Image: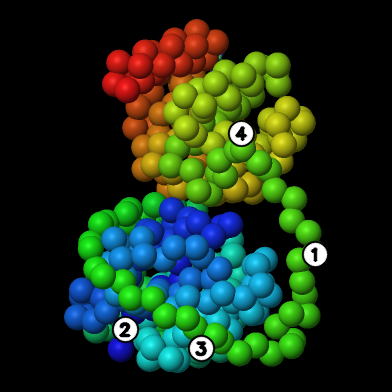
């Protein structure tokens, strides 16, 4: 019995979340005294997975899988789980992984727990800690099925180096024609920008920025920090920023290591989507802004003064520490 982990890649390169789920799978493998088997799909160099505790890699290379297809990818994982007799399967919380999880769960008759934030509290019974109510609470969930699928919340466990000499072998699953009933015909990606889901740091702006003409403040701060940019809902509703940047309960969820909120009041619907971030820095000129209650660090001040100074100091810091 090994732990199977699905390590996602994009354009052949592993996503940060892939290394995190590998680290996490190694943690469970240690609890159960077993090994970690990773599945990769059209990834370039899987040897890096050994640095995060993976013992064996099943490499799938198939042009048909170039674009994500939930049915076909669920088939790949199901067959990999069966081949490696895995009873615990670890996936990330990416949008793709969340699509394939229910199909995989149906195929393997496995219980699936999403939004898991820590190693199992117990392996017998198999009990995991998960977030609930938009990250405002936790619950303990027992998975009683023989095969278990664990969906790890982004940035909940972190990357843990744990050297293993990962061996790689080619894995060729069989597909049903019906797997390809729905096919992606074209992909139009935003280039040169860090995706919110993959970002370690997110810099986000709200209505306090007064207008789209001031967004250079958010972009410049994001650039110096190597961060993704985001915004509150009204900002995208007013067309100051694209809807793809809207974060919160009705937008994208953020689980970054650092979330910087500039001119955002901290309404409950906004917090619901960003609360899972590890450290929250709030810049707001109203000391009563609700966001300060949820913040780890707060600067009470005018964004138009604070942000340029912050950018200047960060640039200086980078030069002095290059
Ligand atoms: P405001 O509430 O107007 O806050 C602006 C802030 O900027 C204020 O705190 C002000 O003090 C500060 N400010 C002003 N000038 C400056 C300055 N010069 N320097 C520094 N600070 C300054 N919202 C989301 O963001 N995401 C969601 O997913 C979402 N989903 C929703 C779903 C529903 C069903 C509903 C009803 C609402 C939802 N909302 C969502 C909207 C939410 O309730 C708030 O209205 C919204 O988050 C407020 O956006 P804001 O903080 O940018 O603007």
Q: Is mark 4 within 8 Å of ligand 1?
A: yes
On screen, residue 285 versus residue 246, left or right, reads: left
- Residue 198 percent coordinates (x, y): 50, 48
Mark 1 or 2: in front is 1
Q: Which image quarter has ligand 1? A: top right
Mark 4 or 2: in front is 2
- Residue 218 percent coordinates (x, y): 56, 23
Q: Which residue is mark 4?
A: 231
Q: Which residue is mark 1?
A: 185
Q: Which residue is mark 2?
A: 2
One can see residue 290 in this view: no
**Image point (30%, 16%), residue name:** 320
For the N terminus, the image quarter is: bottom left
- Residue 284 percent coordinates (x, y): 49, 19
Q: Which residue is mark 3?
A: 79
Which secondary structure lies at badge 1? Answer: loop
For the C terminus, the image quarter is: top left
* Label 3 environment density (alpha carbons within 10 Å; few <14, some 14–19, many ≥20): some
Q: How far is the residue under mark 2 from the one under mark 3?
A: 14 Å
């Amino acid at each position: 019995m090994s732990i199977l982990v699905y390590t996602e890649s994009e354009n052949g390169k592993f996503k940060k979340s892939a290394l995190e789920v590998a680290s996490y799978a190694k943690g469970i493998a240690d609890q159960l005294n077993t090994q970690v088997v990773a599945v990769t799909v059209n990834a370039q160099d899987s040897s890096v997975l050994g640095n995060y505790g993976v013992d064996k890699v099943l490499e799938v290379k198939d042009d048909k899988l170039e674009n994500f297809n939930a049915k076909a990818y669920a088939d790949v994982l199901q067959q990999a789980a069966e081949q490696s007799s895995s009873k615990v399967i670890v996936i990330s919380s990416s949008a793709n992984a969340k699509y394939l999880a229910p199909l995989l769960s149906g195929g393997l008759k496995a219980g699936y727990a999403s939004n898991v934030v820590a190693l199992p509290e117990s392996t017998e019974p198999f009990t995991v800690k998960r977030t609930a109510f938009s990250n405002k609470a936790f619950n303990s969930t027992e998975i009683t099925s023989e095969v278990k699928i664990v969906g790890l919340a982004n940035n909940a466990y972190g990357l843990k180096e744990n050297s293993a000499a990962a061996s790689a072998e080619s894995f060729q699953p069989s597909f049903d024609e019906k797997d390809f009933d729905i096919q992606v015909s074209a992909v139009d990606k935003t280039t040169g920008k860090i995706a919110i889901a993959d970002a370690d740091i997110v810099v986000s702006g709200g209505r306090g920025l007064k207008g789209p003409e001031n967004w250079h403040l958010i972009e410049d701060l994001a650039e110096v920090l190597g961060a993704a940019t985001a915004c509150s809902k009204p900002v995208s509703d007013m067309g100051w920023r694209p809807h793809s940047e809207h974060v919160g309960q009705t937008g994208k969820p953020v689980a970054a290591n650092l979330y910087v909120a500039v001119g955002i009041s901290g309404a409950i619907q906004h917090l619901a989507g960003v609360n899972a971030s590890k450290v929250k820095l709030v810049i707001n000129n109203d000391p009563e802004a609700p966001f300060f209650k949820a913040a780890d660090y707060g600067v009470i001040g005018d964004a138009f003064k604070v942000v340029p100074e912050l950018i200047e100091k960060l640039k200086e810091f980078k030069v002095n520490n290059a």
